[in-house]
Structures are given as C-alpha cells and as structure tokens.
C-alpha cells in the first residue's frame, strides 16, 4: 500500500502564497519546520501543467499516470480540477480510492496482471484495462461482463530516453489475430493503446503510431470487430531538465493534426506522467560536511543517488542543481549523497560557492521518477514530501473541449 506520509503545508490565509521558483526564505522556513531532506511538491504547478497539456490537446481525456509521483496531494489537486487517472497497481488503486476519485475517471493500464489486480480494480469500479497477448486476454473471460480491454501495441521512438515498448506491447501485425481470439473468448476489445517511451524529444513517433492505429481501427471495424471506440496515445510528453524540451504546444500540434485524421467516433485518451509531475518537484538537501580533495571541494549532502536523485540512475535524467546561497566566489565542486557508496555522486563538475555544513542545495524539475524510486539504503531517511499551494487559488476546472 502507498505510504502517504506527505505533509500538506497549508499556509494561513493571510500569508503570501509560495510561488515557483521558491525564494530562499520560503525554503529555509520549510526546512526549519519539516527537517531535511525535503521534496517540495507544488500543487499549483501540478494543476497548471495539467491545464496546459489539456489546452494543447483539446478533446483528449488526460489520465495522469501515477507512477512518476504517486502522491495523495497530487491526486487531490488533480481531482479538484476534474482530472482523470491512469493506474497500474493495487497500491495506486488504493491511493485514488482513498482520495474519493470516481472510478469512472480511472483506467488500469498495466499490460500484465494477476487476477487479484484485476479484481481489486474491478471492485473499485474501473472498467477499462489493457492486454497485449493471448494469455492476458484469457484472464478477462471470467470478468468479461464488467471489463473492456484495450490492446497495447508496441511502437518505440528510438530517441526516447526511456523505452517502454521493449517490455510491453504486441507487434502491430499481431492485432488482427488478437482481435479474433478476443471475439472467440467473448472479451470486448474497446480500443488500442500505445506508449512510445518516456521523455520523447519529438512527437514523430506519436504521430506515426496514431496513423498506424487509425489504419488498424478502420481495418478492424471493416472486419466486423465491434466498435473499437478508444485510442489511448500514452505518455512520453517531455519535461525540461538541464536542457529545455520542445514547448508542449509545438510538441502537440502535429499530434492534433494526426488525431483529426482518425476514423470518426473515437474517444482519445492520453496518460501523461512526467510532463505534469517533473516541474512540480523541488528537492532540498543539507550539506552534512565537506572535504578538499585534489583541488575540488566535495560537499556531502543528506540526499543523493539512493534517495531523490535515484532518477539519475533509473530514469537517466540530470537535474538542474544549485546552492541556495549565491554569495562569494565559486569553487570547483563535487556534490555527493550521504551513503558510504562511491557511486553516490550527484555531480562531479560544478562551480559552487564555498558551502559549509548546514547550507542548503536545491534540485529543480525533480517531481517525476525521483522520490518514487528512492530507497532507504544505509538507513539514510528518504526525503519527506511536503505539498505546498495545496488549495487552488481559483475554482476553474478542466474542461475537455472539442477536438
Ligand atoms: C510510465 C507510464 C506512463 C507515464 O509516462 P510518462 O512518459 O511519464 O508520461 C503512462 N502510461 C503507462 C502505461 C506507463 O507505464
């Protein structure tokens, strides 16, 4: 079950709201109050990113994929603007259930499930699932009156930073056979889905996959395979790290054009995770000690590669890191995590002020695939998640406009 240890930092109504990028005094006050290390999650940013992607993809139902930042405050913030959710495990089902999200706003997209996973999601009320092979379709025979299944097809962008089609998805050529098997089994195939890979630099593969799925859906309908009424275009929408990504409006323009050419009567879904979560997270760590080695200053932090910075290993991202203080001359610097392992180095080629024990270091764009894959290795406590700007400052929901 998800541990929801997130602290909701509710400012008194009179206090100025925090704004991103956080100012130094606000970060120092949060560390004084909640300790270190922290992962600050800005719910305003979560809402803004969901709305911005919604505006770039009008008519597409955005299901936030919980995986990059499975956090109760994030779920509440998105629920508050009518957001929808993409779930992949029993723990994620539990998190949205506890938040009171209507189950019809959720889909379950793990292609490989145990029966208990399917039953848990069904008991909550989820009706849309994903499968990519014959065995998996067989698991839905006993649930066929309550569950619809999207077939996940493999399309991978060679340039995506994280490939998600090596492990999941059937070959496009296998779709007709799977449709026939599903018909024999009496399992309803409601549509197709794909995920071209995470942090995709260009929308080229989304476009090719949409076009290919459009042809497959038209062919399936012509062959009498029911309605196939859903196309789920997955995630992959890129966030800014040390290098800015393509602006989301430009990224989505060719996707919109491809969607406009689809056969009529399709519901289009997307499963954005990183795009929404990444810029909402700010990691705050404290210098524990320092040493001068070979002409470089080594600063040892209380968070590192086994903690919030684990995304550098698992997710292959490099985050913009900086000292909170900006005074004094710069020195050649190495930033490390606290553990006694020598791979636990965040960056060995920085220029930083001469820090001392107690100084704070801030990592930005750290909401996605960071705290979610942190460990407690060496018994160093992982960062405490503190949600800020929890209450929306306006009541505008998200509307799904015409595509
Ligand atoms: C991880 C994942 C996502 C989210 O992908 P992002 O690239 O973070 O947007 C969406 N759907 C599925 C099925 C996933 O596994």
Image (cartoon, grey):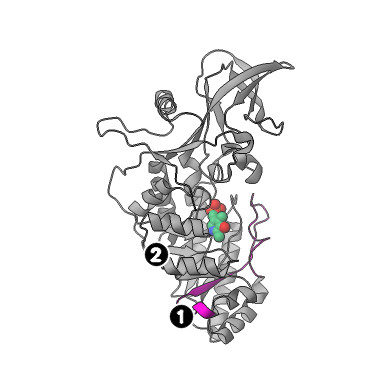
Please give left or right for residue 396 compared with residue 114 in the image. Answer: left
**Quadrant of the drawing holding the C terminus:** bottom left
From the top left corner, tell me how far across and down residue 262 is, in percent: 50, 71
Viewer-nearest residue: 394 or 370: 370
Magenta highlight on residue 156: yes
* Residue at the spot of label 1: 145
Q: Residue furthest right?
A: 294
**Which type of secondary structure does the marked residue at label 2 adopt?**
helix
* Residue at the spot of label 2: 103
Magenta highlight on residue 174: no
Q: Which label belongs to residue 74? A: none
- Part of the protein shown in magenta: 142-170
Viewer-nearest residue: 334 or 303: 303
For ligand 1, the image quadrant comes to bottom right
Please give left or right for residue 72 compared with residue 184 in the image. Answer: left
Judged by its main secondary structure, the magenta piece is loop
């Amino acid at each position: 079950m998800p541990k929801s240890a997130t602290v909701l930092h509710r400012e008194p109504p009179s206090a100025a709201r925090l704004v991103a990028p956080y100012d130094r005094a606000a970060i120092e006050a949060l560390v004084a109050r909640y300790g270190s290390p922290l992962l600050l999650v800005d719910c305003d940013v979560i809402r803004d990113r969901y709305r911005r992607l919604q505006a770039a993809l009008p008519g597409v139902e955005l299901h936030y994929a919980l995986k990059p930042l499975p956090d109760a405050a994030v779920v509440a913030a998105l629920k508050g603007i009518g957001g929808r959710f993409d779930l992949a495990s029993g723990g994620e089902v539990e998190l949205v259930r506890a938040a009171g999200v209507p189950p019809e706003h959720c889909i379950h997209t793990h292609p490989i499930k145990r029966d208990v996973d399917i039953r848990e999601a069904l008991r909550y009320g989820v009706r849309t699932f994903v499968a990519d092979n014959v065995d998996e379709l067989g698991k839905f025979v006993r649930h066929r009156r309550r569950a619809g299944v999207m077939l996940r097809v493999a399309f991978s962008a060679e340039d995506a930073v994280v490939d998600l089609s090596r492990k999941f998805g059937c070959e496009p050529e296998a779709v007709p056979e799977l449709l026939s098997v599903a018909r024999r089994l009496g399992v309803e195939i409601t549509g197709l889905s794909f995920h071209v890979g995470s942090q995709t630099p260009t929308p080229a593969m989304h476009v090719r996959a949409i076009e290919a799925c459009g042809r497959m859906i038209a062919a399936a309908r012509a062959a009498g395979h029911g309605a196939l009424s859903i196309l789920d275009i997955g995630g992959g929408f890129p966030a800014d790290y040390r290098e800015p990504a393509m602006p989301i409006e430009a990224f989505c323009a060719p996707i919109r054009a491809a969607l406009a050419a689809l056969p009529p009567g399709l519901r289009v879904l997307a499963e954005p995770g990183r795009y929404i979560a990444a810029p909402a997270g700010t990691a705050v760590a404290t210098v524990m000690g320092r040493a001068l080695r070979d002409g470089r200053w080594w600063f040892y932090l209380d968070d590192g590669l086994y903690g919030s910075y684990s995304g550098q290993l698992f997710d292959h991202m490099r985050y913009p890191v900086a000292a909170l203080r900006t005074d004094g001359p710069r020195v050649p610097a190495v930033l490390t995590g606290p553990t006694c392992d020598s791979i636990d180095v965040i960056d060995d080629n920085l220029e930083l002020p001469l820090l001392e024990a107690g100084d704070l270091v801030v990592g930005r764009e750290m909401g996605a695939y960071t705290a979610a894959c942190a460990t407690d290795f060496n018994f160093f406590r992982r960062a405490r998640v503190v949600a800020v700007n929890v209450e929306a400052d306006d009541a505008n929901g998200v509307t799904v406009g015409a595509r």
